[in-house]
């Protein structure tokens, strides 16, 4: 089970004054079970520019999908278990990645987690360490490191025995 993430959301009252709408654990957590990644959805927008009107939580009741809506964005934290657990879970995955809005690269022998989305992603490693794998090459990222992922075929490989937490901002982009 991933550690709860405190999420504080601001907004406006009826008089237009700035207020705190919520303060507590993020309500949309998707834990796919032993060995799989756990995803905490923190916020989502459905258009650019984004609307700051209203007080509805766009993460509550929404189906979990990897990419953001067309012209939108997603903000999430993903907890990656060690590859010693995760690789077996990926081999056993039976979901339809195309229906979830991304394409798995099942022919890539380097890692079963290779996939590609039509997004630009800003990734910030919060804790632990993880390898970012590209078709050619890899780089070790540690807590505090940032990766800008620009619609490339990629995978994440946690070669330690500790979880790695990464904050992601995904923004809809034109496919390459």
Image (tube, rainbow, N blue to C red):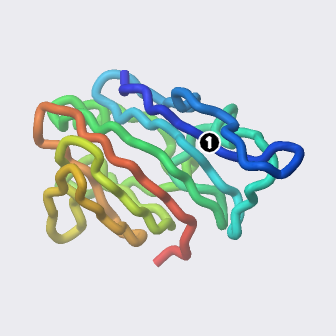
Q: Quadrant of residue 89?
A: top left
Q: Is residue 166 above or below residue 135?
A: above
Left/right placement of residue 11 relative to residue 68 reads right
Q: Residue at x 18, y 37 (%)?
A: 83
173 or 166, nearer to the observer: 166
Quadrant the N terminus occupies:
top left
Considering every residue shown, the one lying at the far right of the view is 14
User: Residue 138 location, x and y as percent?
Assistant: 15, 63
Q: Residue at x 69, y 32 (%)?
A: 61
Q: Quadrant of residue 155?
A: bottom left
Q: Quadrant of residue 81?
A: top left
User: Residue 73 location, x and y as percent?
Assistant: 58, 59
Q: Residue at x 66, y 55 (%)?
A: 45
User: Residue 79 location, x and y as percent?
Assistant: 33, 37
Q: Is residue 109 above or below residue 5?
A: below
Question: Crowding at label 1, few (<14), some or many (≥20) Cα neighbours within 10 Å?
Answer: some
Q: Secondary structure at mark 1?
A: strand
> What residue did someone put label 1 on?
9
Left/right placement of residue 99 relative to residue 146 reads right
Left/right placement of residue 50 relative to residue 81 reads right
Q: Residue at x 64, y 57 (%)?
A: 69
Please tell me how many numbered marks the rendered image carries: 1
Q: Is residue 175 above or below residue 172?
A: below
């Amino acid at each position: 089970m991933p550690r709860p993430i405190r999420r504080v959301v601001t907004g406006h009252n009826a008089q237009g004054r700035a207020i705190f709408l919520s303060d507590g654990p993020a309500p949309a957590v998707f834990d796919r079970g032993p060995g799989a990644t756990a995803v905490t959805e923190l916020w989502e927008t459905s258009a650019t520019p984004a609307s700051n009107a209203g007080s509805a939580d766009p993460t509550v009741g929404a189906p979990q999908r990897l990419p953001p809506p067309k012209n939108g964005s997603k903000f999430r934290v993903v907890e990656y278990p060690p590859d010693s657990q995760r690789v077996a879970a990926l081999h056993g995955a039976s979901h339809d990645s195309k229906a979830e809005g991304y394409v798995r690269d099942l022919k890539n022998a380097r890692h079963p987690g290779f996939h590609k989305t039509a997004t630009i992603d800003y990734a910030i490693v919060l804790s632990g360490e993880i390898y970012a794998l590209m078709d050619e090459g890899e780089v070790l990222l540690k807590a505090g490191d940032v990766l800008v992922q620009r619609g490339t075929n990629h995978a994440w490989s946690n070669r330690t025995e500790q979880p790695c937490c990464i904050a992601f901002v995904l923004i809809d982009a034109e496919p390459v």
